Each structure stands twice: as structure tokens, then as C-alpha cells.
Image (cartoon, rainbow, N blue to C red):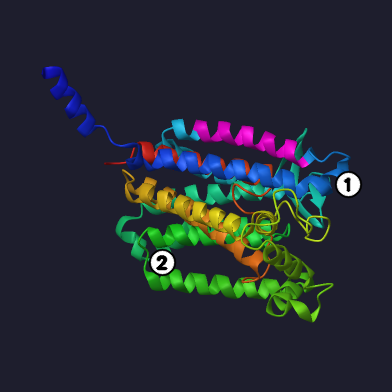
Amino acid sequence: MLTKATDVTRSRVRPRWTERPQLLLLLTCLLMVSIGLVMVLSASSIQSYKQYGSSFAYFYRQIFGVVVGVVAMIVMARTDYHKLRGVARPLLGVTIVLLAAVLVPGVGTIRGGASRWLLMGPLSVQPSEIAKIALIIFAAHVLEGKGRHILDPRQVAVPLLPATSLVAFLIIAQPDLGTTIMCAASVAAVLFLSGARLRHVGLLCLVGLLLVMSLAMSQSYRRDRIMSFLNPWADPLNTGYHVIQGQIALGSGGLFGVGLGASRQKWSYVPSVHTDFIYAIIGEELGLAGTLTVLVLFVFLLYLGTRIAKKAPDRFGFLVAGGITAWIGLQALTNMAAVSGLLPITGVPLPLISFGSSSLVVTMAAIGILISIGRRSRA
């Protein structure tokens, strides 16, 4: 009788697996990465064969990124997230050095007219991806200790505003306006969650929006993206080509798609087919069912991230979890909206799905941090 009573007590105390958002988050992340692997193989096969003589070149590189990402996620999940406080400033400092190194001729690697990568032997590292998580951790560390001073804009601005501005300037110089927007928006999200006055956050966002618009209109290729977004059919073979081909891919998939691997648009019609526009190929090959599945998975991931943030054991964990969740959600929304023609093309990848080892590893490491916070969350 005592044994049975003890078993009943344990069953009541032990939380159900559905009450462990970190476990669900892990499974969701792995499912999305698996979908990404399949779609990268399908979407990149033609371009990979043309460029390297093998349909699997990009796929093998993505597998390598997944392996490194899983290791990074496990390490971060098993590490006490409180230790991030001690590395917040050094991590941001190293990130700034790497961002500056990218701009040095002969050090940074130029692709497509942009200098965004550092070659380290066989590895290609994109420091701007590291900057996203570095800024979130730094902002959470700075704002955590402000207390009542969080209502004073002068106390909040230093050193957060100079650090964010410096990182933004270095990323803009690459040039990479899309990643700059993601970094600034992530910091704004952490600032909002910290309890800063809404009017101060709103004013900061307004100033940031005006700066983005001025930067977007200052370069002809950025200006063309804005114009093509408003009316892509005005120049369907030039400035509107990206948007139109993406919409053709999405529209031709119907309800259940033309079949996995059977895309016609990946035959050099849709540009950046395995990176920025992979969502269009998902729509073509897997149809509305495929795109909605990916959308639902992102919504579920954001729900889990929000739950972890709400149950975080302290303010630092809440800000880090909230910042990571906001960053992933905003980037996913921006990518899918751009592919669908609802926003101008910004050139940001679809988290966990698009090809790109740097983005994948950093995002999975961020998921690991969320899991670490979830493991230590209050009931």
C-alpha cells in the first residue's frame, strides 16, 4: 500500500511532458531543421550541379551546419544561462572586431558585391549573424540592472545606444540592410520588455524607421526594391523579377504542391532559391499545406519561447528569452512576407529552414539558450 501511495504521489508531482516547453521546443526545432534539410536539397540541386558538378554540394554543407548547430544547442542548453552575464560585453566586443575585419580588403570575402564573410580554413563565418544574439545578451545584461532608472531615457541610452549604433554601422557598411534591421529590432524588443516607457521606445523606433527609409532610398538597388514591391509588374524582367517569380512559385503549388523535387521555378527562375526564397519552393512543391505547416511550426515555436520567457526565474532570463523569441519571429515573418510580396525584399533567411551555416548555427545556439532558461524556470 505504501508503494502504491508513493507511486501515486510521484505521478502527481512529476510534470507531464506537455508541461515542459523546453522539450517541445527542442522537438519543434529538430523538426524544422529536418524540413530545412529536405528543402535545401531539393531547392539547391540544380544550382549546385551547375556550380559544382554535384547536386549535393549545398546539401552536404547544410548537414555540416546542422551537426555544428546541434552541438552548439546542446552545449548552450546544458550551460547555466546566468553565465551569459559574464560574457555579454566580451562577446559583443569580439563581434565588433569580427564585423570590422570583414570590411578589411583581403580579409573579408566578397560575394555578390557584399563583404559579409570571413574564411577560416574550410569554414565561412558571417559575423553579422553572431551580432544578433550578442546584442540581445548585451541589451538584457545592461537593462536588467537599471531598476527604476529604466524610466530615464538617458540611463537607458548609455551604453546601449552607442553599442547598437556601432554594430548597425558596421553591418550597413557591408552592406546588409536586412540584418541591420533585425539587430536593431531585437534590441528594441528587449528594451520594450524591460519596462522602458512606451513613448521612448516608440520614438526610438520612429527614428530608426526614418533612418532605414533614408538608407533604403540612398542606393539605387535598394530604391528599386521599394519601387518593385509597390508595383513589380512595372518592370517584370528587371526590378520586379524576384517578386514575380516568387509569387509564381507560390501560386503554382496549389493546395498540395507539384510534388517534392518537382519544382520548375528552381531551374534558374527564382533567384536565391535555397536561401532567401526557399519558402517559395516550399509553396510550389508542397503547396499551401506545406507553407501553412511551416507557418504553424513557427507560431508554435514562438508560443513556446513566450512561455519560457514568462516562466523565467529572473529578469535576465526573461529579457534574453523574450529577445530571442522576438528576433526569430520577426525574421521569419519578414522573410515569408517578402517572398509573398507583402514586404520589400530584405535578404534575410528563413530561420532554421534556409541554407546558411552561420545563420543555422547561431539560431540553434539561441534555441539552446531558451532550453537552458526553460530547464530552470519556475513551475
Q: Residue at x 67, y 42 (%)?
A: 357
Q: Is residue 86 left or right of residue 214?
A: left
Give residue 50's mark: 1
Instruction: State the residue position of label 2.
Output: 153
Q: Main secondary structure of the magenta part?
A: helix
Residue 85 visible to an observer of this rendering: no
Task: Give the position of the C terminus as an image quadrant.
Answer: top left
Mark 1: which amino acid? Lys
Q: How many marks?
A: 2
Question: Does 162 appear above or below 359?
Answer: below
Q: Residue at x 78, y 60 (%)?
A: 270
Q: Is residue 343 left or right of residue 237?
A: left
Q: Is residue 102 left or right of residue 199?
A: right
Q: Is residue 209 left or right of residue 244?
A: left
Q: What secondary structure is marked by label 2?
A: helix
Q: Which residues are magenta?
A: 58-75
Q: Residue at x 28, y 36 (%)?
A: 15
Label 2 vs label 1, nearer the camera: 1
Q: Categorize mark 2 by other alpha carbons within 10 Å: few (<14), some (14-19), many (20+).
A: few
The verdict on residue 98 being magenta is no
